[in-house]
Amino acid sequence: MTAPSPAADRTDGTDERDGRTGNGGRDGLHRLPPPRPAYDAHTWKEIAYLLLNLPVALFGFTYAVTVLVAGGTLTLTVIGLPLLALSLLGARQLGKLERARARKLLGVRVEEPTPLPLAKSGGPVQRLWMALKDPVGWRTLLYDAIRLPWGILTFCTVLTSLFVLWPVLPYLARGMANLDRAMVRGLLSPSDELERRIAELESDRGIVVDTAAADLRRIERDLHDGAQARLVNLAMGLGLAKEKLLEDPDAAAAMVEEAHGEVKLALQELRDLARGIHPAVLTDRGLDAALSAVASRCTVPVTVTVDLPARPAPAIEGIAYFTVSELLQNISKHSGARSASVDVRRSENRLMLQVTDDGRGGADASRGSGLAGLAARLDAVDGLLMVDSPAGGPTRVIAELPWRG
């Protein structure tokens, strides 16, 4: 059996320059296109895919029914939900094999779904819950559950047509293969953008919670080891001074003077702690004044340039402040730089921060340093941190935050 090719050839003897032919002088005379086989390699791949549908669908149907029945029955016990979660993870692997088969035999280009962020989800309960509500695993189980009737139909039709209806088998194979392509795209394709976004937000929420807990522990530690200890010493000193007030006024006066110094130090530590939580200058005057105050405390001369048409939302403003503050602390401690600069501006719907220094370089956020934690904090609010720090310097760190007015 033959089928026409998409291109037509000119007759022998045609002069391409003026269109004259050597066939009686008639212009534009064409011959029939050369024949080609209807059972080409593409058609045989579709036939092979359809014949494999039955064993693959039988295995998938058995897996899906076993998982659903066993998991549903055992949910009354302790092992029910973990077993169902593991089964959904296994369904993901079956979907991966099916996408590979469709890609190889049908030419269907379906991207792989995003892996579950189990490593970032916290404890076993959070991981279990994330696996149980995985939409990719559930769609794969649905795909396996409904494929058995279709697998039987395609296998029987193709096998019969190979002996009885072989002239029309290429057309039947193409039509059934197109339905298979639609099922693969509809049920085995990656989650849509909303599902992707939900998974990212769930992961980011864990980072935000961990960061907030770490900040609370830091504040508690600073209060306990700093201002609280000084206030306890102050109370003890004032108690001793009260006892010596009548017996030895000069010693009591010296102790009161010492207590006065302790009060000043405690107030300074409380001011520093309050500045670490949220500086008053940032609330009152914005990023320009707050970053200038941070730069003045840096051991390296820092040039600050802030070009913003308006103030961003307080949350974004606070994150930008602490990002620059931490980067300037890194410059003071580790860079060995002679000068640095901070540039803050708005670019469309993004707040851009750039901190540069002429130090020794070699900073790398992938080493698990403070830069890695800073990148995780920015990622939790749809931000981005980029570090360009070749050995020998200079170092340039660019941070992006979403602009919210």
Image (cartoon, rainbow, N blue to C red):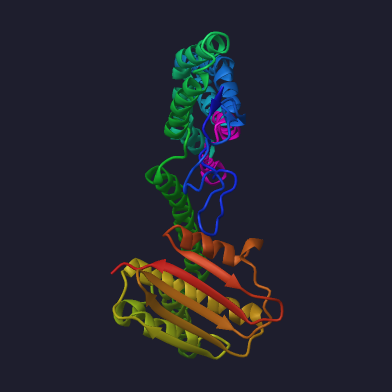
Q: Is residue 13 left or right of residue 216?
A: right
Residue 76 appears in the rendering: no
Q: Is residue 114 above or below residue 325?
A: above
* Residue 129 position in % (x across, y down): 46, 34
| Residue shown at the point (47%, 39%) measured from the top left | 190
Residue 362 versus residue 178: which sits nearer the camera? 178
| Residue shown at the point (54%, 22%) measured from the top left | 83
* Residue 334 position in % (x across, y down): 65, 78
- Quarter placement of the C terminus: bottom left
The span picked out in magenta is: 95-122
| Residue shown at the point (54%, 36%) measured from the top left | 33
Residue 164 versus residue 111: which sits nearer the camera? 164
- Counting labels gives 0
Residue 275 versus residue 404: which sits nearer the camera? 404
For residue 198, what is the image quadrant? Answer: top left
Instruction: State the residue lying farthest toward the right.
Output: 391
For residue 328, what is the image quadrant? Answer: bottom right
* Residue 233 position in % (x across, y down): 50, 73
**Does residue 41 show up magenta in the picture?**
no
Q: Is residue 136 above or below residue 58?
A: below
